[in-house]
Image: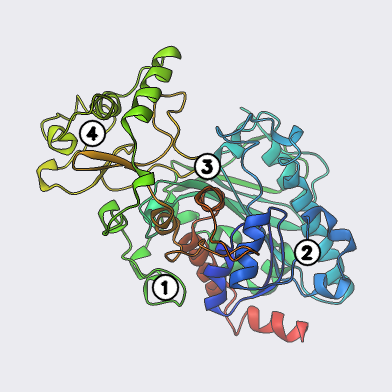
Amino acid sequence: MRYLSNCDGIGAAHLAWQPRGWSCVGVSETAQFPTAAVRHHYGFRRLGNMTGFPAWPEELVAGIELVAAGTPCQPYSVAGKRLGLADERGALLLDFADQFNHVNMIRRKHGLPPALILLENVPRLLGSNDNAFGEFVSRVLGCDAVPETKNGKWPKAGLLGSETARVSWRILDSQHFAVAQRRKRVFLLGVPTELIERFGDRVCPSRILSLRSSGAVKTLTLKVRGGISQASWVAKPSEWVSGSLDLPWLKGVPGVCSLPCRVNLSEVLEAGPVDEKYYITREKALHNLERAKAKRQKLPPLYEAVLMKVASGSRGIAGDLATWTAKEAGNCADLPDRHSGDPIVVPIATSEVANTLTVCLWDGFRSNGLPKHGLVIEGDRLRLLIPREWERLMGFPDNFTLIPNRKNELAKDSLRFAGLGNSIVVPILSWIAQQIEQGFTLDSGLGRLHEQRR
């Protein structure tokens, strides 16, 4: 498969797809550090801003078989102001759909079959007040009006079809894909009708994303159809995939961490010494407690107790936690035995997975009282998750983001945190590639696509 990676970030797509024999036509990325990371590891052709696609060489565009993007999520997530399409970054969603149509126009001109489209974003995109998701799929499907649901929100998993294409989407949680992080993201795959008619239902996006196996598929009633001929949704869809114990990246795929399907934090945390700069000092703990008090934030009991211990200079934090009951521990309902002395990451629902990593460093608490990032309790001390642990929690190899700049200085932590927090979990992209390959098998799909391209 020849793919174009928009909003490329630090290269999760390449790490997942290059070992499978997929080839990158080019990358679109404007941020300096992610661009440098991909240049350092891969050196792919850089195409600049994704909005400049009309001026890209026609020969390059004609060679694209899949357009992919993890468009900026801040306009739709709690990390931003949720301005949706009114945010310049949010509007890139529509530019991406226009790029997909442009690619297929050029491919038709050259007598080639149409390309696929793959989008990744936060689940809140499905409930954006401006119906951004409906705007996006209307362009991908060639609708004469923007489809709308009756309640203004799109289901967590579903399928829409028109005369020209079908799109399927589904929320997947990375904790079920060999990383110890709770990270829910919506993935949408679009397949032109021409390919489905030629190769059969096995290449329908709902089949590729295993929609039917995720729950009961029902008819979706729309307030505005706009040319939609097929609309389905899944009630209470699962956020994992069946048969995940046989995921291919767990068997020594070059460049990808070889991990068991279910990974606990104890397997991710650094085994050796950690630099002193990552530890929370008494002054910093006190500052955050005072700030929470000034904002009248009610902190979860466990987090407040830990910070108070650090702020007061008390010892034996991990030992004290062993006496806490599940009720006293707030949302940490499944606390294991703490007498073992193993490190503990506190801002989690269980001891097995970390909260979602975002682009900001730990500097206090969210509006709901939860810490922004992982705080590791090591005996009497409290520290941050370090960049190498973040890499493992995103499915990247150790020190993947520790790259030199033009002065041969290694990347700062702040750049590494931001690059990883904005990235896509590598194993999920690998699973999607595997599913695409199974649909377009060599004898029925990809083989003929490549023959026509040659």
Give the residue pinned by disc 4.
333
* Left or right of residue 28, residue 184 in this image: left
Looking at the image, residue 157 lies above or below residue 242? above
Amino acid type of the residue that numbered disc 3 sits on in the rendered structure:
Lys
Circles 2, 1 touching at the beta carbon (< 8 Å)? no
Looking at the image, residue 320 lies above or below residue 257? above
Question: First in sequence: mark 3 or mark 1?
Answer: 3
Q: Nearer the viewer, mark 2 or mark 4?
A: 2
Q: Nearer the viewer, mark 4 or mark 1?
A: 4
Question: First in sequence: mark 3 or mark 4?
Answer: 3
* Distance CA(mark 3)–CA(mark 4): 26 Å
Q: Nearer the viewer, mark 3 or mark 1?
A: 1
Give the residue pinned by disc 1.
248
Instruction: Categorize mark 1 by other alpha carbons within 10 Å: few (<14), some (14-19), many (20+).
Output: some
Give the residue pinned by disc 3.
156
Q: Which residue sits at x=77%, y=59%?
A: 100
Question: First in sequence: mark 4 or mark 1?
Answer: 1
- At mark 2, the secondary structure is loop
- At mark 4, the secondary structure is loop
Question: First in sequence: mark 3 or mark 2?
Answer: 2
Give the residue pinned by disc 2.
47
Quarter of the rendering containing residue 292: top left
Amino acid type of the residue that numbered disc 2 sits on in the rendered structure:
Leu
